Amino acid sequence: MSALNVTKGVHPVTLTYDGEGLRIEGDLNAHKKVKSHYGCGCVPLPTPKGPDPTLLPIKNTYLLQVFYNDKTNMVQIHAVIPQAPDADDTDFELYKFMYSVDKDKVDQAKMYCHDIMQSVYHDLKPEKRLKVLINPFGGQGKAKSIFETNVRPVFNAAKCAVDIQYTEHQGHALQIAKEIDVDAYDAIVTVSGDGVIHEVINGFMQRPDAGTAIRKVPIGIIPGGTGNAMSICMLGEMAGFDPVATALQVIKGRPLALDICSVSYDDHRYFSFLSHSYGITSYADLATEHLR
């Protein structure tokens, strides 16, 4: 266990790291209540029987960045924190903390932050290079605002390099995945529904290096379309619809293998990852596409 003494204004704050998470102690504003839809935040007052409002534990999973800023002479902590840690159906929110460091503790602070980052990302790649595909036509056309409002701030807080491209027509994501430089990115992220994920998978599978490419560049999923079944399958009904929670998964998640189904029809071969249908169900789906 290691500790660093810092300050917030005139108040002393202690940062303690035990290998499993970081604990902030002494910050009166750290343990704030969940924000309302109007953006109002409140600080709970300490009560004799209640939890200490100046104590905030943050698990490794939720820590994005812990670093010393030379320009401000401050330790900065970026984290995504569940608003109700003990509840399964809770929203996630991005938090940023900044604490001043005494001049004689600068070297200690830098080493402290370095050691935490080494532990937090010990088997993960920090500061990922992300290719982000946004479908501006999917769902109710909210994918762009979902990304800019909820997802980009999380990626920025984790110091990810983000390359954004908007899909312009059906099959565009397939073409992008088919031609993408797999050495230039650590993941390809879809901000849409299941349709763009389907295109990306099929684009990878049409490459001459399909087996290598699809293993080298995992797919990250941000729900932004009509159907978000894959996201729900991965994180559950609540978190699967939460763009902040899914952004955290892109940053801190580990790649998992996915079974896909190969289907040949006439002279075309398709790969499906959720379901496949034929007969009247398929014809009805195709014939009513314009009614979506």
Image (cartoon, helix red, strand yellow):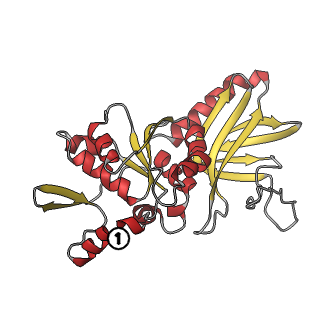
Where residue 83 appears, as percent x and y from the top left, is 67, 60
Label count reads 1
The structure residue drawn at horizontal position 47% and vertical position 40%, both measured from the top left corner, is 122
Name the element at disc 1.
loop
Of 18 and 34, the residue lying toward us: 34
Instruction: Tell me if residue 25 comes above or below residue 107 in the rendering.
Output: below
186 horizontally vs 60: left or right: left
Q: Is residue 212 left or right of residue 139?
A: left
Give the residue at x 54% y 55%.
Answer: 142
Q: Amino acid at mark 1?
A: Thr
> Is 44 displayed left or right of 127 in the figure?
right
Q: Residue furthest bottom?
A: 280
Residue beneath the point at 83% across and 56% down? 43
Reading the image, the residue beneath label 1 is 288
Quarter the C terminus occupies: bottom left
How packed mark 1 is, by other alpha carbons closer than 10 Å (few <14, some 14-19, many 20 or more), is few
Residue 20 in sight here: no
The image quadrant where one finds the N terminus is top right
Looking at the rendering, which quadrant does residue 47 occupy?
bottom right
Q: Is residue 255 visible?
A: yes
Which image quarter: residue 46?
bottom right
Q: Is residue 238 above or below residue 248?
A: below
- Residue sitting nearer the eye, 273 or 276: 276
Q: Position of residue 20 (x, y in %)?
A: 57, 49
* Rendered location of residue 124, percent (x, y): 44, 41
